[in-house]
Amino acid sequence: EHKCVLDSCRALQGEGFDITYLPVGPNGLIDMEQLEAAIRPDTSLVSIMTVNNEIGVRQPVEEIGRLCRKKKVFFHTDAAQAVGKIPIDVNSMNIDLMSISGHKLYGPKGVGALYVRRRPRVRVEALQSGGGQERGMRSGTVPAPLAVGLGEACEIAGSEME
């Protein structure tokens, strides 16, 4: 996983959350049987990157999403390395949360996006309080040039994807 995800998990551990880390095989892939065995009744989220940023391996995201849906566990994927390069269908892949980063698809630096499934609904709490922008998820004025740049980068990448 990317350092930002691992650091977030470590911070949650510091707050008392129980985090399970799974190894990957020699080919860089997650073992689906091991993942299924690791999901406990109190597991709330599985987070696995779509494409590894160091070795480029593509995880079986659709299979992971199916398993998470079956187990009634939310599924997050860091798709920063995948968006605009491979087809991603959040519905068929049962992705509940997906994060992307603008600079990974030739968009502006300093902007990203978080997809949050509406149905079945995923509830996410704001990290900070304030003016209630972005439906209460993120306070502060949205940097319009960055948001537009990210949107345009996604449009271009999608139209040029092979």
Image (cartoon, rainbow, N blue to C red):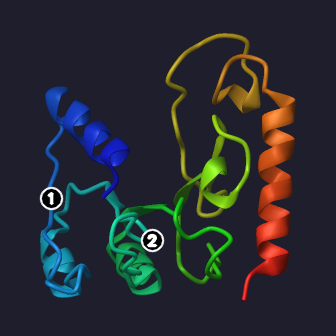
Q: Is residue 143 above or below residue 94?
A: above
Occupied quadrant, residue 60: bottom left
In this rendered view, identify the residue nearer to me: 47 or 39. 47
> Residue 72 location in percent, x, y?
37, 68
> Residue 94 location in percent, x, y?
53, 75
The residue to which callout 2 is attached is 50
Occupied quadrant, residue 88: bottom right
Pointers 2 and 1 in contact (C-beta within 8 Å): no
Q: Determine crowd level at label 1: few under 14, some 14-19, many 20+ residues with C-alpha closer than 10 A.
A: few
Which quadrant is the C terminus positioned in?
A: bottom right
Q: In this view, does 139 lie above or below 1?
A: above
Q: Is residue 33 left or right of 93 when viewed as pictured?
A: left
Residue drawn at (63%, 76%), measured in percent from left and top?
85
Residue drawn at (62%, 68%), measured in percent from left and top?
83
In this rendered view, identify the residue nearer to me: 118 or 111. 111
> Residue 76 location in percent, x, y?
44, 59
Instruction: Kindly identify the amino acid type of the residue bearing the numbered disc 1.
Output: Tyr
> Residue 101 location in percent, x, y?
60, 50
